[in-house]
Amino acid sequence: MSHTPDPLAPSPAARPGLTRLAAIDLGSNSFHLLVANAVDGRLQVVARRGEKVQLAAGLDETGNLDAAALDRAMACLSRFAPFVSDIVPGNLRVVGTNALRDAANSEALIERAEALLGCRVEIIAGREEARLIYLGAAHSLAENGRRLIVDIGGGSTEFIIGERFEPLALESLQLGCVTYTRRFFADGAITEKAFHRAELAAHSELANILRPYRELGWEDPVGSSGTIKAAAAVIAAAGDAPEGVITRHGLDRLRQRLVQHKRVEKLDLTGLKADRARVFPAGVAILRAIFTAFELESMRYADGALREGVLYDMVGRNSPEDTRLKTLEALEQRYGVDPRQARHVAATATALLAQVRHTWALDDDQARFLAWAARLHEIGQAISHSQFHRHGAYLLEYSDLAGFSRLEQRRLAFLVRAHRRKFPVKEWQALPAAEQAALGRLARLLRLAVLLNHARPEQPPAVPVLSAEGEALHLCHDAAEDPSLLHTDLEQEAEYQAAAGFTLTLG
């Protein structure tokens, strides 16, 4: 059920301990909006909206979203916009999933959506989507025990095994009710042959994860999101299973009934909404393949999904519970980062930033990414010392990093790529225009922090005075007072920055 905000409700500022949050999920089939008050770690829903946009159906042969899909998306977001117009900056997250991951022209939608909503649109990786789905579903389930969570979306299907609020296995496979409709039910015919082909294709995808998932095991199979909710409703309406439960028998009977209808436009099933009918046969085919492959007899439906997970994740962001901090620690351990050196470089970078922060208008989030990049600047050495800044950047940009959006990974990757040798002007100019100025400044600070710690001292070095005037930096470091190699390194750095169009003076 949709809810409109109550104009007479007290504002968030007037209610102690309350924070109003909002999430928009730009899914491949549907767009969803969730607005909620966060009170003591719990969510109180204020507004919930969902619309079938079928973004994935607009991907043409060249991999671009067509004009009609872009128009559908923006029309939906224009209806969502009034619900988030008073959300405090930083308390609204907009995440894009499979269709935007795949679309070659995703920026065409992102730029328009950001202008409308006044908020960044984050494209999240498949495993990050799975993590957030699990977080949302887990909060809607009271029971403990090991769960298998399945979420069939428009372009991908996520599979998670977890206990309580901790995922143990995360996967996102290229199975989706919109993409499978285009592949196997494009002409609207619902036939045995189409079902068989769709189920075989799904089995082929599932083969990649079956063994490790079976070995890990689970006690409670749970499904979330639209396809599973619709299947459960139709099966219950037919009397083939209790409400909110999908059984193998009920699913087999549902498949038979779909084939008997012969065509999508003739579907008339109690419990099935008209706007889901087009993609429903494909969703049922994927679900049957999952039941067969995982040898399931039943699955129950859970309300929580991606948008709930996004909100719960926001509650813990920039706190000791921030998932990104756990990811950083895991990366440091996995790639054998020297913890003392990483700590020293991060402390120096933070101290340098503090001196120019006001002049350069750098905020807390940017300061956070500078410190994180400092902690990770040497991870590429696990591959090779030669060009390790390039190796580190590659690892950060293309790994699945829990808690991070693709843009956030790209920020970290650029800073690590830029921390030594020639300033990577080409890569810098390839960043989103809105990111270039701040990331260029952060990179220059990180480069100085690395040089000041080049001798790998046992104690953090004294931080020289740094000042900024416009884009020009001046570092108080006199060669006469410090005859070490450091001044030579700094002179070389001034040349590197000059070659990139920046000014760094010493003295």
Image (tube, grey):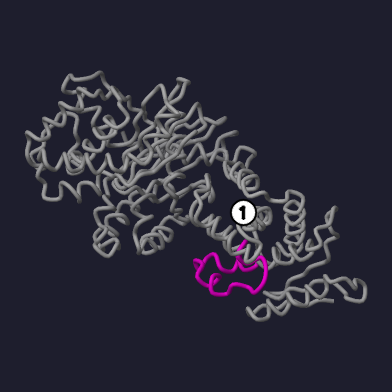
Q: Look at 17% across and 27% down and name the residue there.
A: 252
In the image, is residue 316 above or below residue 332?
Answer: above
> At x 88% / y 71%, what residue is drawn?
484
**Kind of residue at badge 1:** Asp
Q: Residue furthest right?
A: 481
Q: Nearer the viewer, residue 87 or 65?
A: 65
Is 58 located above or below residue 287 in the figure? below
The residue nearer to you, when weighing 287 against 403, is 287
| Quadrant of the rendered image containing residue 49 | top left
Residue that carries the numbered disc 1 in the rendered image: 365
On the picture, is 17 further left or further right than 172? right
Q: Is residue 385 left or right of residue 184?
A: right
> How many circles with numbers are drawn on the protein?
1
The quarter holding residue 273 reads top left
Range drawn in magenta: 416-441
The correct choice, above or below, for 457 with respect to 8 in the image is: below
- The percent position of residue 218, horizontal first and vertical second, equals 42, 25
* Residue 461 x/y as whole percent: 84, 59
Was residue 429 drawn as part of the magenta stretch in this picture? yes
Is disc 1 surrounded by few (<14), some (14 to 19) or many (20+) residues within 10 Å?
few
Kind of element beneath mark 1 = helix
Q: Percent x, y for residue 149?
A: 39, 32
Say whether residue 430 is magenta. Answer: yes
Q: Main secondary structure of the magenta part?
A: helix
Residue 265, quarter of the rendered image: top left
Q: Position of residue 158 (x, y in %)?
A: 38, 40
The quarter of the picture where the C terminus appears is bottom right
| Quadrant in the picture for the N terminus | top left
- The reply, left or right, for residue 401 in relation to residue 384 is left
